[in-house]
Image (tube, rainbow, N blue to C red):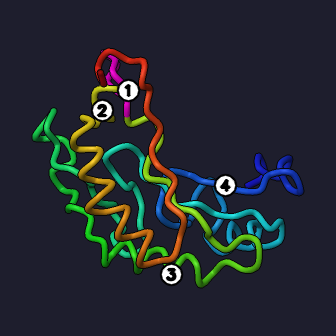
Amino acid sequence: MEQLEIFSGTATWYYDYNFGIKDRDGKTAEEQFEWLNRNGIEYIPIASSPWIWYSHKENGGCKLMEDIYNKEERWWMKMCEVDTLVEDIEYTQSHLEGKAKMRHIFMNNEGYLNCDSVQCLRGKIPSDVQVDIMRNTFMPLAERTGLDLVSPTFKFDAEYYS
């Protein structure tokens, strides 16, 4: 969290492409909770394209859609379940105080990528699947947790989505 100290007192929210705080970068989860609470920085759970890399309940993460590009990739990941994600949010929320309490949930960021790099190909979510993930996972999740849902970003001028 040392690299984040520069944002103490200026940032109002923080996300890390996870659904919970875990030990990382030499800091324990408890140290990270303490930093968020001390600085009043809201933690926001967010998916990383079609996957949730870490959740408190499912340590190996889970997937939001079947892998339609490479059936071998992430074969070990289970499909995400709303009940499990609700438990993750409740667990994380129980460690946050004051302004650090979660108020928002992000569906994902840049699910619209359409390029030839490995990162883009692995993260690309077809628009119809994106809508299904929003409707079947994130809308019920936001309703059950009382968090405001922030929709994914789209690049509407891209030919791929017209």
Q: Are dots 4 and 2 in contact, CB under 8 Å?
A: no
- According to the picture, the residue beneath numbered tag 2 turns out to be 124
Q: Residues within 10 Å of mark 3 (few under 14, many from 20)?
A: some
Q: Is residue 6 above or below residue 35?
A: above
Give the spatial CA distance, label 4 vs label 1. Answer: 22 Å
Neighbourhood count class around disc 1 (C-alpha, 10 Å): few under 14, some 14–19, many 20 upward: many
For label 1, the residue is: 113
Report the disc number at residue 14.
Answer: 4
Residue type at the position of mark 4: Tyr
Name the secondary structure under disc 3.
helix
Task: Characterize the magenta stretch by its predominant secondary structure.
Answer: loop
What secondary structure is found at the residue carrying circle 1? loop
Which of the two discs, 4 and 2, labels the residue nearer the N terminus?
4
Residue type at mark 3 is Tyr
Question: Does the magenta run of residues contain 128?
Answer: no
Mark 2 secondary-structure assignment? loop
Identify residue type, mark 1. Leu
